[in-house]
Amino acid sequence: MASVLVGQFHARDAEGRVYPVHEFRESQPVEADGTEPKSTYRLAIGDRVNHLGGDDFELLQSGTKITRVS
């Protein structure tokens, strides 16, 4: 199953660096059991990002915490 880019945003770490983040979802809109497909996040350069909740994220390779900017 393919993932589709559904959004892009910038996030900032505690030192002020800005990271371009892409949000992906599975191409099928609803799973067989009726649940929504799960979103996955990656930096523009391909590094994986873990969503911690709300506007908080963490870079998986380095453990750096980043926050979505408006």
Image (cartoon, helix red, strand yellow):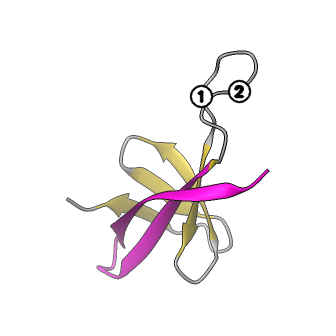
Where residue 24 sits, quadrant-wise, is bottom right
Residue drawn at point x = 29 percent, y = 79 percent = 16
* Quadrant (top left, top right, bottom left, bottom right) of the C terminus: bottom left
29 horizontally vs 22: left or right? right
Label 1: how many Cα within 10 Å (few below 14, some 14–19, many 20+):
few
Name the residue that disc number 2 marks.
Answer: 31
Name the residue that disc number 1 marks.
Answer: 36
Using the image as rendered, state which of residue 29 and residue 38 is in the foreground. 29
20 horizontally vs 40: left or right? left
Asked whether the beta carbons under mark 2 and mark 1 sit within 8 Å of each other, the answer is yes
Task: Indicate the position of residue 42 as horizontal and vertical percent values.
Answer: 58, 67
31 horizontally vs 17: left or right? right
Where is 64 relative to 29, above or below? below
Task: Indicate the position of residue 39 as horizontal and vertical percent values.
Answer: 58, 46
Type of amino acid at the residue the image marks with label 1? Glu
Where residue 31 sits, quadrant-wise, is top right
Label 2: how many Cα within 10 Å (few below 14, some 14–19, many 20+):
few
At numbered mark 1, what does the secondary structure look like: helix, strand or loop? loop
Using the image as rendered, state which of residue 1 and residue 41 is in the foreground. 1
Type of amino acid at the residue the image marks with label 2? Glu
Task: Indicate the position of residue 33 as horizontal and vertical percent values.
Answer: 74, 15
What numbered label is drawn on residue 3?
none
| Sooner in the amino-acid sequence: mark 2 or mark 1 | 2
Where is 68 relative to 29, above or below? below
Residue drawn at point x = 67 percent, y = 56 percent = 3
Using the image as rendered, state which of residue 52 and residue 41 is in the foreground. 41
As for residue 2 lying within the magenta part, the answer is: yes
Using the image as rendered, state which of residue 61 and residue 38 is in the foreground. 38
For the record, the magenta segment spans 1-25
